[in-house]
Amino acid sequence: MTADARRVVIDTNAVLDWLVFREPAALALGAAIEQRRWTWCATPAMLDELRWVLARPLAARWDQAKELALTIDLRALATLCEPATAAPRGALVCRDPADQMFIDLALGWPPCWLVTRDKALLSLRHRANARGVVIATPGWWQREHTAPRSATRRDAP
């Protein structure tokens, strides 16, 4: 990891946007991770969930992309982090218990970004920002990192 590398936690659907659906904003984030300009922090449980979702059926038009995503060595792309054994200081509770692991990990590694399209996680963005975690959509992450610094805000998705 380079001295200026940044940390990002990516929820499962945003990873799917990158690896399967090839959404432009998610591809920009993926390129930053692949080039090691950003560090993707994930727990083994997050990667297991991603593999489980990739194994489920998708519309036939996504079969080839899904199969390709299943061949990717996720552990080579992600930096494995141990899940918090206790709630991090200043823990926030997500309305969706399945998404709690993403906010907990991000809060355990500030400063950090959490990239998601999930409304339950996005609703925590103002309180998370006060704790050093920026929660944003892939599109907002892309705009933040391709726009001049003076024209951006850290607290809006």
Image (spheres, helix red, strand yellow):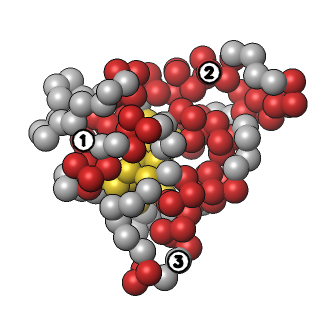
Q: Up-down: is 35 above or below 45?
A: below
Location of residue 13 by image quarter: top right
Question: Tag 1: residue type?
Answer: Gly
Q: Residue at label 1?
A: 108
Q: Inspect this view and state whether residue 39 appears.
A: no
Q: Earlier in the sequence, mark 2 or mark 1?
A: 2
| SS assignment at label 2 | helix
Q: Residue at label 3?
A: 147
Question: Tag 3: residue type?
Answer: Ala
Instruction: Count neighbours of disc 3 (C-alpha within 10 A) and say few if under 14, some if 14 to 19, many if 20 or more.
Output: few
Relative image position of residue 132 (x, y in whole percent): 24, 56
Q: Residue at label 2?
A: 53
Identify the residue at horizontal 19%, vertical 56% (top origin).
130
Q: CA distance from mark 1 to mark 3?
A: 28 Å
Relative image position of residue 109 (x, y in whole percent): 28, 46
Kindly report which numbered mark, 1 or 3, lies closer to the viewer in this rendering: 3
> What quarter of the picture does the C terminus occupy?
bottom left
- Horizontal side of residue 80 vs 103, given as left or right: right
